[in-house]
Amino acid sequence: MQVLPKPATMKNPPEQFTGDVWLDPIVVPQDADQRMVVALVRFAPGARTAWHSHARGQSLHVTSGVALVGTRDGVVEVPAGGTVYCPPGEEHWHGATPDDFMEHLAMLENADDPASTTTWLEHVTDDEYARP
């Protein structure tokens, strides 16, 4: 057994996020054959990711607030306690509602080449963010 030190909270980069978003890593691979990554991500009101996709998919479990999760087909609201699965390659984004903070656990597996785990795309426009 190994007790791991708590990494520092990181502010996510503006190239991939709109608004203030913070990330606390929880699980990262400890051995070469491990892939699991888990992080607690906190979004300020109105904050959101850019469009992106994941090579092996992603699960989001909302721990507080209400998440907005968008695909090219529309946006859904996911309340605290809800979980969303975004399959491999699906372009999506996620963030907080305009008036409230939101936090979720982001869970995914690294790709064979960890650098290709997430493909970042363009920022979500205000119109896309407001779309029902």
Image: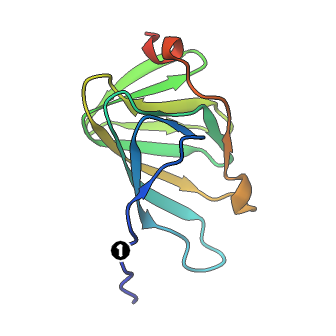
Indicate the secondary structure of the residue bearing disc 1.
loop
> Is the C terminus in the top left, top right, bottom left or bottom right quadrant?
top left
The residue lying at 63 percent from left, 30 percent from top is 91
Residue 14 at x, y = what percent? Answer: 54, 41
Residue 99 at x, y = what percent? Answer: 25, 23
Q: How many marks?
A: 1
The residue lying at 47 percent from left, 52 percent from top is 107
> Is the N terminus in the top left, top right, bottom left or bottom right quadrant?
bottom left
Q: Residues within 10 Å of mark 1 (few under 14, many from 20)?
A: few
Placement of 35 over or under 13, stated as above or below: below
Q: Which residue is mark 1?
A: 6
Q: Is residue 88 visible?
A: no
Residue 73 at x, y = what percent? Answer: 58, 15
Image-quadrant location for residue 104? top left
Placement of 1 over or under 22, stated as above or below: below
Residue 35 at x, y = what percent? Answer: 60, 65
Image-quadrant location for residue 78? top left
Way the structure is coloured: rainbow
In the rendered structure, the answer to whether residue 79 lies left or right of residue 60 reads left
Q: Is residue 20 visible?
A: yes
The residue lying at 33 percent from left, 25 percent from top is 97
In the rendered structure, the answer to whether residue 119 lies left or right of residue 44 reads right
| Residue type at numbered disc 1 | Lys
Of residues 43 and 75, the one nearer the viewer is 43
